[in-house]
Structures are given as structure tokens and as C-alpha cells.
Amino acid sequence: MNPSRKRRIRLVVALTAALLAASALVYTSFSAGSDERTAGQLLDAAVAGKTYTLAGTVKDGSVRRGDGVLWFSVRDPHRPVAVRVRYTGIVPDPFREGRGVMVKVQRRGDLFMGEKDSMVTKCPSKFQVAPPRPGSGPASPT
Amino acid sequence: MATVGRALLIVAFAVALYGVGASLYGAFRGGHAWVDSGRRAVYALAGVLTLAFAIMEIAFLRSDFSFNVVATHSSTTTPTFYKATAAWSSQEGSLLLWVWLLSIWSSLALLITRRRVREVAPVATAVLMTFGAFFLMLTLFWANPFESLAQVPQEGTGLNPLLRHPAMMFHPPMLYSGYTLFSIPFAFAIGALVTRRLNAEWIVSTRRFALGAWLCLGIGIVLGARWSYTELGWGGYWAWDPVENASLLPWLTGTAFIHSIMIQERRGMLKVWNASLVLATGTLAILGTFLVRSGILDSIHAFGASTLGIPFLILIGAMVLGSVGLVTWRRADLRSEHQLDSLFSREAVFLLQNLILVALAFVVWWGTFFPLISEAVTGTRASVGPPWFDKYTVPLAFALVALSGIGPLIPWRRLTMASVRRGFVLPGAAALLTVLALLLVPGAWQEPKAAAFAGVVAFVLTSVGQELWRGMRARQASAREPAPVALAGVVRRNRRRYGGYVVHAGFAVLLLGVAVSSSFQHAKDVTLRPGQTARVDGFDIRYVRATARAEAEKISLGAVLDVSKDGKQVATLRTTRGFYPSQDISQGIVGRFFGGERESEVGLRAGFGRDIWTVIAPDLAPLTPIIERGNRTFRTAMVGIMSKPDGDQQQAVAQLYALRDAAVTAVARRWVTSPWPADFRFIVSPLATWIWIGAIITFLGGLLALWPAPATARRRVTAGYAARVARELARTTQ
């Protein structure tokens, strides 16, 4: 076979394979992607059994722990509503009230069940320590 | 001092602009004096920025809170080591670090190449100085590290506790070194395209910088993974977080580049591909810097909301458009000199490996930016998680490791049956035996992917060992040297080749650690009281006792755990969670000591066979009534003190603070004297340590490849290269 024709065929085969692989990638990302929603959007339209990524701020005074379960509410950034989340698994160190979080959830009635180990907490860019004190602070090791 | 720092930034900005102008004027109006002046401007920039960086460092070390950046990222209680490194935990300081490193590496590159690539270098200088001017503009107008405070606070706000880890402190300088070093081949590629000097000379001149960039970026990525494993309290080392991915993208395309340039150097092929790869890598390095700062994607690591997105987008847009335009414009000059002789040749393996690396980069890019893509297409922001990434990256990584073993065994141009017999029999047998041996291990057959991976790793290690053995035997035969001397000699004379083989071996070991530790990992979340035991993967882990430590910097509540197997003690683990004080006065005089940031100290017993990892999450709820009582008591006492005359107040406040300190210590001691159940996460990961061992082998191999060759070998290479350049010149002038 003519070498240039052979090269052209190779190129067409390679490009077709690349196109097919890219199409699979695009298709699976859209089908496997978890929609990011705010608390208000979830309360309005979340379907039971479907997984969503809930994004918002942990509501002040809402955090409770017990029997390895973390309960907290996530506020909507635009509306005065919040959803209650039951979560198990890793709680990132920066997690606390007033901090931005993202967690994968499924609706079960009024409650949202967090997917285990799915929580991401925004790392704070700034960190506050206690104001200056006269002594060296509580320094005695126990 | 802040004023001096600001003045130095202005001078540096002016020097960078002058460097751009002088280099371009010299390049296109033919003035050597202007070209030299432009190059010297880069040296001057490095000098000025070294001074500026030193001023910022001194301010951190002296806790000079008149600098806003010091007041918001350090404190008097921050340990000295972390004071020195807190500079790059801030947006402002990290930008200054970026441009300072750029100036240092650019100076080195231009110094080394001052008598080579004379036509290309001025344009490259202008590109590098444009980057410098851009980052200096950011520090001058958007994120000034020398911004001073009108009212100087007595105490700073401290370094983010999560960043108080040695790995995290070296991670940013290594990443930035990688990014800035990749700017050098990028700049020289632009220079080569603009001046049509598209032979391999610019590649040879900047190859070492590309390898250095690859090495630094790789070390930075691994340090970040190590930090994640030992500091973040979730037990993993890679989460496909956007910021992690941002550093992986240029590393992947950079890896492809340092392989494919060998084909251009040797056979004059893949010129378009190499130019495109290095331009993409340079652009992805800037994209990585941008992603951390823009806040466009949610990440644990980002600097938070930032206004730097638009300037970065303009720069990246210009880089993409310029790169595509230049490659299209010069496509006639980028034609390959030879065609691929056979699909079964080393060139073809390199090309396939390149395609896999680029495919990996595309997968990572798509997954990282999918929230933005999905929002643009469907109007809804969606994200893909680790399972989606794993689905594509695992088979691609598998193929990549296999090719890293196959490549060295295949000759250039065409594979023959004789070379198959010579090269593949032993590694193939080793792979087969490894898989068969693993299938005999109970439970291993349940994870066929891990067994297959182990087989491929055995193939790679044997092929590398075989190549080293053959090289050593050949030298032994010719030089009549003892085996160790012959081995050292053969490696020393061809560091690039054997360094590359060591990198392949290390990378295979690293990925074996990843495959086995993730496939056979056992994790368990339990709640234990002191004296209680949990069983994880055959290990009995007993909560021996609670520990508490109250210091000026933080309060640590933790546990001592005893690990045993079949009644035999294996290890003692210590894990703590640190509670940093808060400045929020609404939490009360005592409460604020427990209400700030938190960070985990992992209990880890690392071993060649397996890692036993644990972290504690103490619940502070039982302390709440005591803390609230303390808050009330001290508030009442403080009101009483305020009613006293001024002279007595100061002494009374000092006494009150001493009492408060004792009270806080006593509250923390409750964790030891009346312990309540605590949540633990236990993870047993087989071969996890081999991830870090593999990384060390990889980087030692990279260092070996980077190390300059002995003078004799270098002369030989240079002579061969000179002959090549002469051939290319003859061809272009025909």
C-alpha cells in the first residue's frame, strides 16, 4: 500500500478512536455528575433517591453529635431556609458553624442523608487566635 | 520597612517592563547591546526581588504586625519555623514567592544559555519578563505583600493550623519552582517559533529546566499528598480535589514532553507535538496558579474569594491564542524529518505513552472543570467524584506503567524477533510468576486488578534490572572492572538513560503502593471508652488512656492506643486533636479557647508491610456546661474589676487571667480525669509506605537524570548534536 495512504488510514483510525473515547468521557461525566444545589433548591425540587451535592453554610447552633452521627443544618446563601443533614464518616478539621461546606445528600422526607465521607469543607484563608493576654496563657501541661 | 518593600516592587516592575522592551528591541532591531541589557535586567530583577522577599521574611520572623500580611498570617505564638514559612500561606506572599522564583530560575537559564540560542534567547527573555511584570502587577495593584496597617495590633491572627506541617511548608516552594521552571521551556519555545529556529537547539538548551520543573512539581505533589495523609485526618493522600488536579495537569503534559523531545533530538520527528506540548504545559502551569486564586471551583485548599480571576483569565487567554496562532503560523517549519518506520518501535511506544499521558491530562482537566462545563451546557452546576476519575485514570495508569517497562526493551526504528527474545522473556516470566504467586495468596484473587498491576510492576522492575545488568556486563567485559564499579561507571556515563529507568522503577513501585493500599484497605469508624478494644483487619486496637495538654498555642485532647495481633503487641499509637483559640468574644472568656480552628494529629505506625493509621475526634459537648459556668463566673468577675479604680484594675486583670488560664487547664484535664467516649477512625493499609518509597526512588532517578554528565560524555553528545544541527541547517538553506 502507498505509504502516505497508509498513514492517512492510521490517522483516521486514531482520530476516530480518540473521538469515541472523548464521547464516552463526556457522556459518563454528564450521567455520573452530581448536581450542585442550594438548600432552597433541594427543598423545592429534590427527588427521593437521587444524589445531589448540597452547597451552603453550616447554620449556627445546628451542630449535634451522637453515636457516630453528625447532625447539622445547611443554610441557603440566598433565601432564609435551611435543610437538616444526617451525616456519618469523616468530618474535615475545618468543619464548624458558619463555614462553607459541600456534602453529597439524598432526600428522605424532610431529612437529607449525607453520603459517608463525602463532606468537603472550605479551608479558611484566615484564622483568628485569642487576643493578647498578660501571661503566657494556659501553659501547664497536664 | 514596608515602604522599602513597596518601593522595591515598583522598581522590580519597572525593571521587568524594561527587560521586555530591551529584549524585543534588541531581537528585532539587531542590537546585541540591547539584548545583553535585557538579559541583565533579569539578573537585576532577581536581585531586587531577593531583597523584597528578604524584607517580607524578616517582618515575619520579627512578628512585625505593621505588615498586614504578617498580622493576618502569623502571631507571636507561632513557632519560628512556621513564622519563616508563613509568608507563602498568604495570597500576597505566595505571589511574591512565585515571581521571585521565576526571576531566580530565569536568571540561571539565561546565564547558562548566554552563548547559545542567541536568536531565540531575547524573545524568551521578553516572555519571561512579561510573566514577571504580570505577577508584579498583581502584587502592586491586587495583593500587595507590603500593605501596612494604620493601627498596629499587638498580636497577629496566626497561621492556619492545618498548614503547620513540615511537608506543607515545602510543598508551595516546590510547586512554584515547578511552575516557574516550566515557564522557561515555554518561553524558549515561543522564541524558537517567533524566530523560526525550530531545530532541536532550544530543546537541548532548556531540557534540563524541563526535567527540573518535572522533578520539583512532582516533589511538590507528593509532599501535598503526604500532608493530606498525615495531617488532614481522613486517611487518604489524593482526593481529586481541583487544586490537587491543577498541579497534576502540567506534570502530566510535562512528563509527555520530556519523553517526546528524545524523539525530536534523535530522529527530528514530532516537532509540532513537542511545541504544542511545551506550550500547553506552560499554560497549564499558569492555570494551576490561577485555580488556587480564582475561587471559581470549590476546593479545600483555595485562598478563598479572590479578585485575581480576571487578570489571570486574560493572561491564560493570551497564552492559548498566542500558542495556537504561533504553531499554526509555523506549521511548515515544524514538519517531521522522518516518518514512523514501524508501530513496533521505541518511537511508537513513546508516542503511545505520550498519547496516554495527554489522555490522562484531558480526563483530569475535564473532571476538574466539569462544574463549569455542566453549568455552561445545562445551566446546573454538577461535579464528578473520585469514582469517575478512577474509572478512567486507573486503566490509563496501568497502560502507562506497562509501557514504561516495554519502552526500554524495544529498539529504535523497528522491533525484530531477536530483540523480542532478548528483551521480553525474562520480564514476561517475572510478571507471569508474580500474578500466579499472588493468586495463591488468600483473598488476592478477589482483587484481580491489583494482582494484574503487581504483574506489570514485576515486568517493569525486571526490565529495568535487566537493562542495568546488561549495561554492567558490557562494561565489565570491555573495561575489566568489578561489578559495582562497572555498574556505577555505566550509570555515570549515561545518567539521562539510566536515571530514566530508575524513574520508571520508582513510579511502578509508587503505583503498586496506590493499587494495593486502596484495594486491600480496611477502615473502621468506632466509638470507644478507655479500656475498650476495636478489631480492624485482625489487629486489636485498645484505647489505653486519654491525654490532654494545654499550651499557649492550643489545647490538645488525645488518646494513647495499643495495637496488638494474636496477643502480641505491635505498636503504640498516639493521636490528638488540637483546639486553637478563637478571637470571637461571643464564645466567652473560657469558651473561646475551645471554639477556634481544629487540627488532627494522626497516630501512624508505618511499616513495609502495612500502615496502621488512626485519628481521634473528641466530642466537646460534655464540657459545654463547665465552659458556660466558667464564662459566667469570669464575666461577673470582670464586671467587678471594671468598677475598681484604675490603679488596681491592671493587677486585678492580671490575676483574673492567671485564674482563667488555670481554669482552662482544669477544663482540659476533665478529658483525662473523667473521660467520655471518643470517635476514632482506624485504617489498615497494606503497602502504603511503598507509595512514599516509590516517590523517593522516582525523584532520585530524576535527580540522576538531571545531574550533568561527565565532561567526556558531554563532549561526545555535543559533537553528535553539532552534526545534527549542521544537517538541519543544510536542509533549511537548500
Image (cartoon, coloured by chain):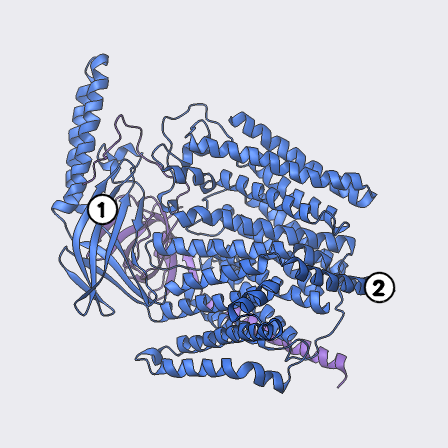
Chain colours: A purple, B blue
Residue at 20% from the left image edge and 15% from the top image edge = B648
> Residue B44 appears at what percent x and percent y?
65, 36
The residue that mark 1 highlights is: B557
> Residue A89 appears at what percent x and percent y?
29, 59
> Residue B343 appears at what percent x and percent y?
65, 79
Instruction: Answer few, some or many: residues within 10 Å of disc 1's Cα (few below 14, many 20 plus, some between 14 and 19).
Output: many
Chain letter of disc 1 in the image: B
Does B592 sit left or right of B472 as displayed?
Answer: left
Q: Secondary structure at mark 1?
A: strand
Does B430 sit left or right of B16 as displayed?
Answer: left
Q: Secondary structure at mark 2?
A: helix
B60 or B466, which is in the foreground? Answer: B466
Residue type, mark 2 in image: Ala
Chain letter of disc 2 in the image: B
Q: Mark number for residue B486?
A: none
Does B455 sit left or right of B186 as displayed?
Answer: left
Residue at 54% from the left image edge and 25% from the top image edge = B3
> Which residue extends farthest right?
B734
The residue that mark 2 highlights is: B730
Residue type, mark 1 in image: Leu
Q: Quadrant of the C terminus of chain B?
A: bottom right
Spatial distance from mark 1 to mark 2, Cα to Cα? 74 Å
- Residue A32 seen by the camera: no
Indicate the quadrant where residue B724 lies.
Answer: bottom right
